[in-house]
Image (cartoon, rainbow, N blue to C red):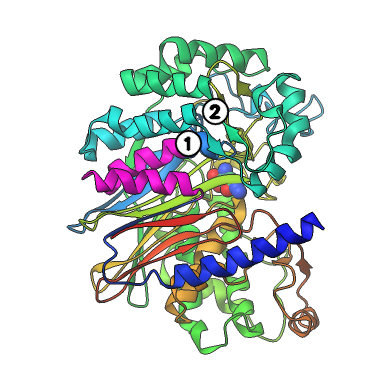
Amino acid sequence: MNTIITRTRLVLISVLSILLSGCTEEKSIKAAVVSARKEASKIGVEIMKKGGSAFDAMIATDLALTVCYPNAGNISGGGFLIYRTADGKTGSLDYREKAPIAASRDMYLDKNGNIVPDKSTLGGLAIGVPGTVAGLEAIHKKFGTLPWKDLIQPAINLALNGYIVTEKQELSFAEKKQDFIKINGQNTFYAQNFRENDTVKNLALANTLKLIAKHGKAGFYEGTIANDLVERVQETGGIITHQDLLSYEPVWRDPINFQYKDLNIYSMAPPSSGGICLGQILKMIEPYNVGHYKHNSMEAIQIIVEAERRSYADRSLYLGDPDFVKIPQNELLQEKYLNDRMKSFTFERASKSTEILPGTISWEESEETTHYSIIDPMGNAIAVTTTLNGSYGSKVYVEKGGYFLNNEMDDFSSKPGFPNMFGLVGGKANAISPQKRMLSAMTPTIIEKNNKLYMIVGTPGGSTIITSVLQTILNVYEYDMDIQTAVAAPRFHHQWLPDIITFEPNKFKRNLFDSLQKKGYDIKEEYNRIIGRVDAIKVSDKGIISTGADPRGDDEALLLY
Ligand code: DON
């Protein structure tokens, strides 16, 4: 009975919030933050109310997520920022985790060369050297306008006063409780059975944040926090040392930039595959005018899936950390190469992934993430995707510091051709090496139209990140959906291997599946918690801001009028 009431209430709330979000398209909106949690969006907006920029709001929002969204928000993971300043300058920061200095190619294999289950996902050995705090400090140094400590104080207050557990969060804590206990013992903080509407105060995290507020990056990578972190990593079988922490540096990189029709798109460069794969897929789709086919019709799905298949095949061979492997970036995005890749596509039957190998390029050899989008009153735009990788990362909790550590090492290819936790395969380009960054799929993206800001978009979702961002862009641009409808619209996903299209359940028609199966496509219709939670902002030709917060999560857009 209670469950039914709760569900009905939830549906009503969802419908209401969609209606309300639909009403966000008003001229008077000056700024917006769309993130995975209302508290974090609110803190970001408050910073802009005080005169802060999108960059300032980013830092405050990020740290608020660390407090109230501990499955993905983090000071102990990594991420990517794409930005576009009000005067049209674009750039990106890579603060992705790195393999520890003591890491080695076969560290997750047994003596027979087989992958040891859980070794790259659970416990100390799964942890990559965190990049978040160094990333936030670098952003503040380059773009911050308000004092560093003022940007951290709201997160400290949130940790001291507590955040309210949502229904989805209660389920998420319960689901992972046994893992928390397995790694951290019965008395670990997050094994306390927090229920919906409980207030969670995290005093240990408040203290950690105070040290970061006082000492900046050094507050995290040196001193007490660093000591506690290294101790905890080593207690749980990991290999991160003080030297790893001291040598971590984020990297400013040129974003991947490409055109799709009259859109000018900026997205993340390697070590994320996001920008290159998004570019490849859109460029492969472009000649087919997908918008001429009905939204989610069989033909539209075929075009998109076949482009996705070919791009994910390339990803497996060519992409990795550009500081370690040479990536044929321009070649992979060349129109002729991509048109040739699609030559084997026919509407008559499905291509088979066994027949679609990574393309031949001749070139000179030399369950949890979170995304937020911000626009400020000046017109600066921010797209950030940040992660611990799996939900609550490695599940290793630094009790003294109040936070979980990532399990990003699983994003490496532990063994050529063998899938990671997202089913993604890779090879030499993404093999483990000391201090190398693991390949990501995170796709924070900023789009211009007619030289003006048009869209800010991104999502969590592991391997589905790229295809969820892609569908959101197509929904707005090709299918004329408002941004909230585009974000909420049913999604599907294909990633070359396994050779299957995953559809969100109960959102597509049976006869569509029958028709696709007749063409030779394998279909899986199931609830997939990682099909993305897209948070996006759109700016119309007339400069009107509208927002899309994914109803699949607790995501919320907050606005500044
Ligand atoms: O960097 C990546 O691609 C992954 N570590 C992202 C993980 C993720 O999105 C999990 N979230 N649902």
Front-most of 220 and 366? 220
Q: What span is colored magenta in the figure? A: 36-64
Q: Earlier in the sequence, mark 1 or mark 2?
A: 1
- Quick one: 31 or 197, which is closer to the camera? 197
Residue 162, image x, y percentages: 52, 32
CA gap, disc 1 and disc 2: 24 Å
Q: Residue at x 62, y 72 (%)?
A: 306
Whether residue 404 is situated above or below residue 264 in the rendered picture:
above
Q: Is residue 39 magenta?
A: yes
Other-residue count near label 1 (Cα within 10 Å), few / some / many at <14 / 14–19 / ≥20: many
Task: Determine the image quadrant of residue 262.
Answer: bottom left
Q: Is residue 231 left or right of residue 213?
A: right
Q: Which residue is mark 2?
A: 201
Could you tell me the amino acid type at mark 2?
A: Lys
Identify the element where label 2 is drawn.
loop
Is residue 354 shown above or below 223? below
Q: Residue at x 59, y 53 (%)?
A: 461
Badge 2: residue crowd in 10 Å (few <14, some 14–19, many ≥20): some
Label 2 residue near ligand 1, CB within 8 Å: no
Q: Residue 68: x, y in percent?
A: 53, 38
Image mark for residue 333: none
Tell which of 427 and 424 is nearer to you. 424
- For residue 78, the mark is 1
